[in-house]
Image: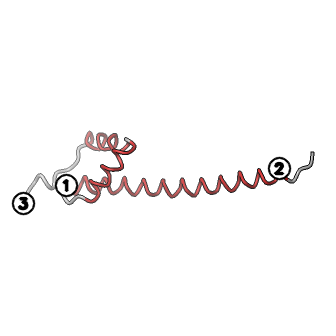
Amino acid sequence: MNNDENRLITPWGYIGYGLLFAIPIVGIVCVLIFSFSSSYPCRRNYARSVLIGFIIALVIGIIYSVTAGVSIMNILNSFSSYRY
């Protein structure tokens, strides 16, 4: 049994991975690589949780953008019916 494979992430490790994942393009690539790698289950699970958070944030952002866009279009269309 290999103990290196089952080692835990230290609190500083979580901070470091959080900072790494916060870098725009490099972070997304690292999250994807760590999420689908077979080594280090703790790192893989943390990366998967960050990936799920990214996906949830993306879905909420899309819903918010569509809702805001529809609201702005309704406001602009209501101005076109006024006569000056």
Return the residue found at the far right: 84
Q: Which mark is residue 79?
A: 2
What percent of the width, then of the height, locates residue 37?
23, 58
What percent of the width, then of the height, locates residue 55?
44, 57
Say what amino acid the circle numbered 1 marks: Tyr
Quarter of the image with the N terminus is bottom left
Residue 24, image quadrant: top left
Q: Secondary structure at mark 2?
A: helix
Q: Which mark is residue 67?
A: none
Return the residue found at the far left: 1
Q: Nearer the viewer, mark 1 or mark 2?
A: 2
In contact (CB < 8 Å): disc 3 and disc 2: no
Q: Secondary structure at mark 1?
A: loop
> Residue at coordinates 34% horizontally, 46% vertically from top-left?
27
Say what amino acid the circle numbered 2 marks: Phe
The residue carrying pointer 2 sits among few (fewer than 14), some (14 to 19) or many (20 or more) residues within 10 Å by Cα, namely few
- Count every numbered label the image shows and give the total: 3
Q: CA distance from mark 1 to mark 2?
A: 58 Å
Residue 42, image quadrant: bottom left
The residue carrying pointer 3 sits among few (fewer than 14), some (14 to 19) or many (20 or more) residues within 10 Å by Cα, namely few
Q: Which residue is mark 1?
A: 40
Q: CA distance from mark 3 to mark 2?
A: 71 Å
Q: Secondary structure at mark 3?
A: loop
Q: Is residue 69 left or right of residue 5?
A: right
In the rendered view, tell whether residue 56 sits above or below residue 25.
Answer: below
Q: Which residue is mark 3?
A: 1
